[in-house]
Structure formats: structure tokens, C-alpha cells
Amino acid sequence: MKRFVAGFAAAAVAVVVSSSVASASVAGLGKAEPAKPNVVVDWNQTMLATLAAAAVPAPPAIRYAAIVQASVFDALNGIDRRYTPIRVAPEAPRGASRQAAAVAAAYTALVSLFPTQAPSLDAARAASMASLGGDDESQSVARGVQWGTSVANQILTWRSTDGFSTTLGSYPIVNAPGHWQPTPPAFSTNPVFRTLAITTPVAMTSPSEFRPAGPPALTSALYTNDFNEVKTWGGLTGSLRTAYQTETAKVWQLDTATAIWNRVADSLALEHHMGLLASARLLAMMNVSQLDAVIAVWEAKQFFDRWRPITAIEQAASDGNPDTSPDASWVPLLATPVHQEYPSGHSGVSGAAATVLASFFGEHTSFTVTSNGVPGASRTFTTFSDAVAQVADARVFAGFHFRFSCDDASQMGTKAANLALTKLMLPNHEQREDSDAND
């Protein structure tokens, strides 16, 4: 239980969003002043609203967010030319409006991905364009719109062939101890989002680049400890969880990782009065890193094919471990996701998000997490690692992950993010003369 207690005890600190950390890692980070409008953050919020309205499940939401934020970054960077592009060469026409380019890039990506939401997106676009103090006919705005639209279309074309939409055959179920089995309530025989395992990453060279060593043997001390932990703390009934811990499980599960972490990034960008390009780079780096992390996690899920706690506990008599006991009546607090257990998706993408945010704002940063799935609930932290630790606790409390799966996944996410930080959006010392460092 020491691994559990250490992870959860560090998390419940009630402080409002503030930071006292180094800002050297990103341009546009400033001291506390009255907040100014930021169309990049505004359209990131529009993106989250669009994903929520479409009820996009957590894993594919990560891919959509990466597409949108890559579009916004390359559009703005194409004007300022201060960093290496993610995909699109920086060839914006001189005098193009930065704000118009950001709006057009986000709008074009979103309306292409979610055409049924065109009316609400059209309204958001109109409001943004009106706030620029001009219309589509002004030369600067028109150039910005044309450029942002072009960039988004190029990003969309690039990712349209990334493999995510591949049609796969039936999943081969292995009826042996430790292997994934269909779980209630759906008992689906096909784990969902399997194509993420073959989706082309952005910074990684292949989906398997950060494949972990694998889960512990069923007869190992680590497996025994984590089996008994989730059995004790993750059951629907008879658990040792407190009401706060039960709520914690729901906070992290009943909203997407994309929504949770983007809200944190938005709040910190505004808190630090980041300019447009700095905000775009933050959001693109975080969302692209999360995309690579979820690709790595899903590749490992397919490779290791591990059973969920509900299966492990029901079939414990077959695992060869005398220190694990079966319980056919045990059910988890929350419904088990329809895909393999190892490694944990949420821990992986949270590890990536936390690594990026720490690189921009410093590890010792205070921030608050909210969840649309649990209105009024919040969790506040003083370090990003505390939040990642609580994600692991939450998955155990939910009853559908072993702690070792969360630990290994968070390390994968950290590796994916560190790779992105060293390969993508690097400073370009040959910026344009008319570049505005303040966006």
C-alpha cells in the first residue's frame, strides 16, 4: 500500500492557479497583468466545446486536438517564422493578420472534421472576425484568412493518410491467463481504437519506439501487490475508498484527458499573458505529444494483450499465483473501457501533457483541474507530477487498471513528450524582419 498512499497523499492541495517558475523555455511568457484577449486560447476552448458536442471518445479526441493545434501553430509560425514548422513551410504573405490566420486555421480544421457543427463554428468565426476590428475584405485580414485556411487544409491532408481510418479485421482473442477477454457490460469482442496502434506518429519514428518492457509476471510480487490493491480499493461495493477518492475516480474518467489538460494549458497561458505564437506553440506541443503518447500506448496494448482487473479477479484461480484469490462477484466502481489493460491510456497522455507543461512553466506550478463530468468538483496541485500520480490513483479507484500499468504508461508519455520537445517547433534564428515577438 505504500505505493498507493504516496501517490494520493501528495495531491489534495487547495490553491488557485498561480506560478512562480522559470519562463525561459517559451517566448511570450510575462508577469501578471490584466488579461488580454487571446484568439488562440479562445479557439482552443471552441475546439473543446466542439469535441464535447460531438461526444468524441477520449482517444480519438487526442488526434483531433493535435490536428487543430498543429494547424494553428503552423499558421502563426508561417507569419512570424520563429520556429521550425510541424509540417507546413512558413510561406505566409507579408502583412497577413496573425489573429485572422489563427482563427481561419482553427475554424477550417474544425469545420472539416465536424461538418455537422458548421452553424456554431460559423457563428464563432464571425464573432472572432468582428473582434479584429475589420472584416474579410481588409487586405491584412484577407491575407491572414487565406493563409490560415491553406495551412489547415495542408495539415488535414497530411493526417488523412496517417492510418487511423484503416479497417481492421476481427481481434484474435487468446483464451489463456493474463490475456484480454471481453468485459461487461458490452462484452465486445473487438477492443476499440485499435488503429491508433498503426497511426503514424509526429515526433516518434514508429508507434513502437517507446514500447515498455511489459507487465509483471502473474506470479510476481508486483503483480500480487497491485492485484490486491485494485481488488481492495476499486470495487463497486465493499471498497476502502472514501467519498473523496470515489469522486477523484470520476473527475478523471468522466471527462476526456484532452479537455482536462487543455483547460489547464489555457488557464496557464492566460495567467502568464502568453502571446499568440507562444500560446499556439504550447498547445501544439502538448496536444501533439499526447497524440504520440496515445499511439505508443495503443501499440503496446495490442502487443501485450493484457486482461483487465475484472477478468483477473474473476479468473484468479487460473493465474498460478497462490496469493491472489478469485471473486466472481467483484465488479469495478466504473465501467471497464473496451480495450486492453496494459498500459494505461490516461496515464500515458497525462504524463505527456504534464511533461510539456512543466517544460514551459516549471515543475513547481500551481494549477486546478476541473471535469465536465463532475460539475463543481476540482483538484488543485502544486506540481505536475502530483497530478499524474493522482491519475494513477484514480484508475485504481475506478477499478479498471493495475498501478504498474499506470506507472509504465506515464513514463512512456514522458518519453514521447521529451522527444517532441527536442524535435519539434525549435527556435529558428532566421525570423522575418517584420516578426512581432509580442504577437
Image: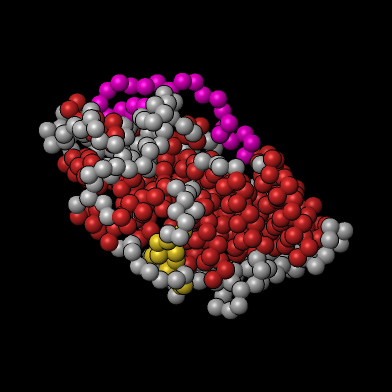
Q: Position of residue 37 (x, y in %)?
A: 66, 69
Is residue 170 rendered magenta in the image? Answer: yes
Residue 53 seen in render:
yes
Q: Position of residue 52 (x, y in %)?
A: 57, 47
**Based on the displayed image, in which of its 4 quarters is residue 180 positioned?**
top left
Task: Using the image, determine if residue 145 lies above or below residue 228.
Answer: below
Q: Which residue occupies 20% across, 55% down?
A: 2
Residue 301 seen in render:
no
**Based on the displayed image, in which of its 4 quarters is residue 129 positioned?**
bottom right
Q: Is residue 201 left or right of residue 298?
A: right
Looking at the rendering, the stretch of residues picked out in magenta corresponds to 159-182
Q: Position of residue 352 (x, y in %)?
A: 45, 52
Q: Is residue 108 left or right of residue 225?
A: right
Q: Which residue occupies 33% across, 21% down?
A: 174
Q: Is residue 261 left or right of residue 151?
A: left
**Foreground pick, 260 / 173:** 260
Q: Position of residue 62 (x, y in %)?
A: 53, 45
Is residue 234 rendered magenta in the image? Answer: no
**Based on the displayed image, in which of its 4 quarters is residue 46 positioned?**
bottom right
Task: Using the image, determine if residue 300 lies above or below residue 259.
Answer: above
Q: Which residue occupies 70% across, 70% down?
A: 436
For the C terminus, give its image quadrant. bottom right
